[in-house]
Image: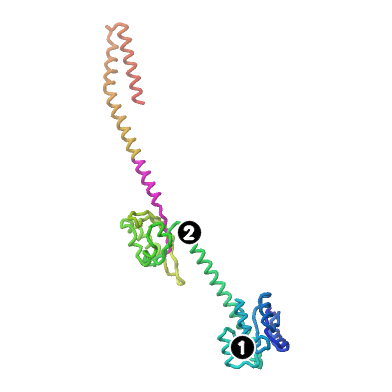
Amino acid sequence: MTRPLAVLMVEDLESDALLILRLLARAGYDVNSLRVETAEELRAALQEQIWDIVISDYSMPELDGSRALAILQASGLDLPFIVVSGTMGEETAVEMMKAGAHDYVMKDNLPRLVPAVERELIQATVRRERKQAEEALIRSEQRFRSFVEQASDIIFTLSPEGVLTYVSPNITEILGHHRDAFLGKWYEDLVHDDDLPATRAYLKRLVATGDKQDGVEYRLRHCAGEWRWHYLKASTICDAGGAVASVLGISRDFSERKQAEAALAQAKEAAEAANRAKSQFLANMSHELRTPLNAILGFSGLMTRDPALTADQLENLTIINRSGEHLLNLINE
């Protein structure tokens, strides 16, 4: 199975170029080639097409190998550059290698060209993949940095022992301290004493098990001296061997919500106290009203049984008794 290969030849002799192309074809390459002789032709070829490799003679009337290499480097393309020459001495070859050529082959030893091409194509692939990985890493770091800089929460990392190794810049806005004041410090030095046991236990479980844990509430001191409530949610970052290398934490300031909850609790307690006071007041008033009212109802009821009462007296007592019972019903309700 043939392998496609795009070769840019910098060669003034067509016969030498054809010999090189035959060697590559015999090695199993489906060669697409272009031969150039001048600097202008070389620059135009580098811009017009994608090449896999550049094979250049060293001594030519209008363009030597050194200048051809310089033109390739100026283009910014990372292509293997192999010098093939019949007149280049060892000292010149060493100078070309120092300048950036990847290999050189003497024309009286052309069979060495194919292995050199194969090796440099592999190395070019490795360099390209490494560059792509580095660029992807840079983009990932830029995205992470942008995320961290725009986040409303404090993002930090701890060593497994609990030393701060990174703190997001927004800590200055949230707590008023410069981030450098935190780096290298023990997290326990920053947490309120009353919250240390719960925070310490949370991180200890996290490092020991690596399992996700429910968050923990704790207080951090603002530069103005007040304690701010934060909610911490953390996870572990492991090394290649699976051991915990660091702890990634996200700390959210929820002091306003905590204050609102406290105010709501106070309002609820005040309302409950008012309800208790009202209930007690009603109970006391009910008792105070029932005492004389019971006497009124009792005596008015007894008096209505007196046979000596006139009709008007009986009616008046009945009105008194009926009004008292109505009042008693109101109190009961």
Q: Position of residue 121 (x, y in %)?
A: 62, 80
Specify the label residue 127 is tagged with.
Answer: none
Which amino acid type is shown beneath numbered disc 2? Gln
Query: Where is mark 2, residue-wise?
Result: 150
Q: Quick one: label 1 or label 2, which is nearer the N terminus?
A: 1
Residue 5 lies left or right of residue 329; in this view the side is right
State the quadrant of the N terminus. bottom right
Residue 257 lies left or right of residue 61; in this view the side is left
Task: Give the class, few, some or many, for how many residues have Cα within 10 Å of label 1's Cα (few <14, many ≥20).
Answer: many
Task: Pick the residue in front: 62 or 112.
Answer: 62
The quadrant holding residue 275 is: top left
Q: Helix, strand, or loop for circle 2?
A: helix
- So how many labels did they put on this image? 2
Query: Where is mark 1, residue-wise?
Result: 104
- The residue drawn where x is 28% and y is 7% is 309
Up the image or down, 63 lies above or below 156; here it is below
Residue 254 in the magenta stretch? The answer is yes
Up the image or down, 244 lies above or below 26; here it is above
Q: Position of residue 88 (x, y in %)?
A: 62, 92
Task: Pick the residue in front: 17 or 64.
Answer: 64
Do callouts 1 and 2 mark residues in contact (Cβ within 8 Å)? no
Report how far apart the C-alphas of labels 1 and 2 lie in the structure. 52 Å
Q: Helix, strand, or loop for circle 1?
A: strand
- The residue drawn where x is 31% and y is 56% is 194
Q: Position of residue 286 (x, y in %)?
A: 30, 27
Residue 194 in the magenta stretch? The answer is no
Q: Which residues are magenta?
A: 247-269
Which amino acid type is shown beneath numbered disc 1? Tyr
Secondary structure mostly taken by the magenta-highlighted segment of the chain: helix
